[in-house]
Image (cartoon, helix red, strand yellow):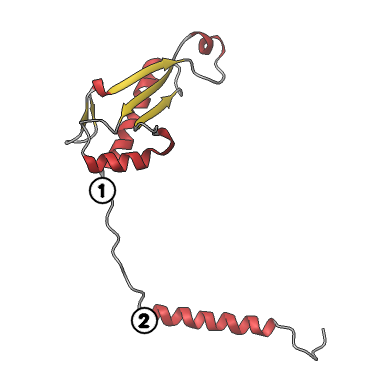
């Protein structure tokens, strides 16, 4: 069971783990032992996730999300299955925690009168500077 927060818990039955051989350097060990973990979590059909969290999670998952709504996390940083397994579960937990926090709605604000005046003064100043750079007929180069 993964405890995401007080309200969200993911039972182990909703997670599917597959152990595969890790890529990259590692000598004989990497060729013999399947230490890398591919963790799959069906976010779209999970009864453990509230709908708003599910929507944010699918947006946050990015490339890790399949068309069917399954989140795939691959972990192969460590030499043992157990550490890679813990790493994959930890990454999934962090992702769901981020999705569980609703973003604050944007509050519309207006620029102050002083900031508008500063901006317009700055634009007028730049315009004058640039107009002085123009080539005038009759002036020598």
Quadrant occupied by the N terminus: top left
Q: Point out residue 48 in the picture as x, y percentages from the top left corner.
A: 20, 31
Residue that lies at the very extreme toward the left in this rendered image: 7
Q: Residues within 10 Å of mark 1 (few under 14, many from 20)?
A: few
Work out whether residue 49 or residue 90 is closer to the camera in this orientation and state it.
49
The residue singled out by tag 1 in the image is: 102
Quadrant occupied by the C terminus: bottom right
Q: Point out residue 104 in the picture as x, y percentages from the top left corner.
A: 27, 55
Q: Judging from the image, what secondary structure is the residue with disc 2 in?
A: helix
Residue 133 horizontal side relative to residue 92, left or right: right
Q: Judging from the image, what secondary structure is the residue with disc 1 in?
A: loop
The residue singled out by tag 2 in the image is: 113
Residue that lies at the very extreme toward the front in this rendered image: 68
Instruction: Give the residue displayed 23% in from the left and 40% down from the top.
Output: 51
In the rendered picture of this protein, how many numbered marks are placed on residues? 2
Q: Point out residue 66 in the picture as x, y percentages from the top left corner.
A: 39, 32
Cα gap from disc 2 to disc 1, whole angstroms: 33 Å
Kindly check if marks 2 and 1 are in contact, taking CB atoms under 8 A apart as contact: no
Question: Which one is earlier in the sequence, the residue at label 2 or at label 1?
Answer: 1
Q: Is residue 34 above or below residue 72?
A: above
Residue that lies at the very extreme toward the right in this rendered image: 140
Instruction: Give the residue displayed 22% in from the left and 24% down from the top.
Output: 11
């Amino acid at each position: 069971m993964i405890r995401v927060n007080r309200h969200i818990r993911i039972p182990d039955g909703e997670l599917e783990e597959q152990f595969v051989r890790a890529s990259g350097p590692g000598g004989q060990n990497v060729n013999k032992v399947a230490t890398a973990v591919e963790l799959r979590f069906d976010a779209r059909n999970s009864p453990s996730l509230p709908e708003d969290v599910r929507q944010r999670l699918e947006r946050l998952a990015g490339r890790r999300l399949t068309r069917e709504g399954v989140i795939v996390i691959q972990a192969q940083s460590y030499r043992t299955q157990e550490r890679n397994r813990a790493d994959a579960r930890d990454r999934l937990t962090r992702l769901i925690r981020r999705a569980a926090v609703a973003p604050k709605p944007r509050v519309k604000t207006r620029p102050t009168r002083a900031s508008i005046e500063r901006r317009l003064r700055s634009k007028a100043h730049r315009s004058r500077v640039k107009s002085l750079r123009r080539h005038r007929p009759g002036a020598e180069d």
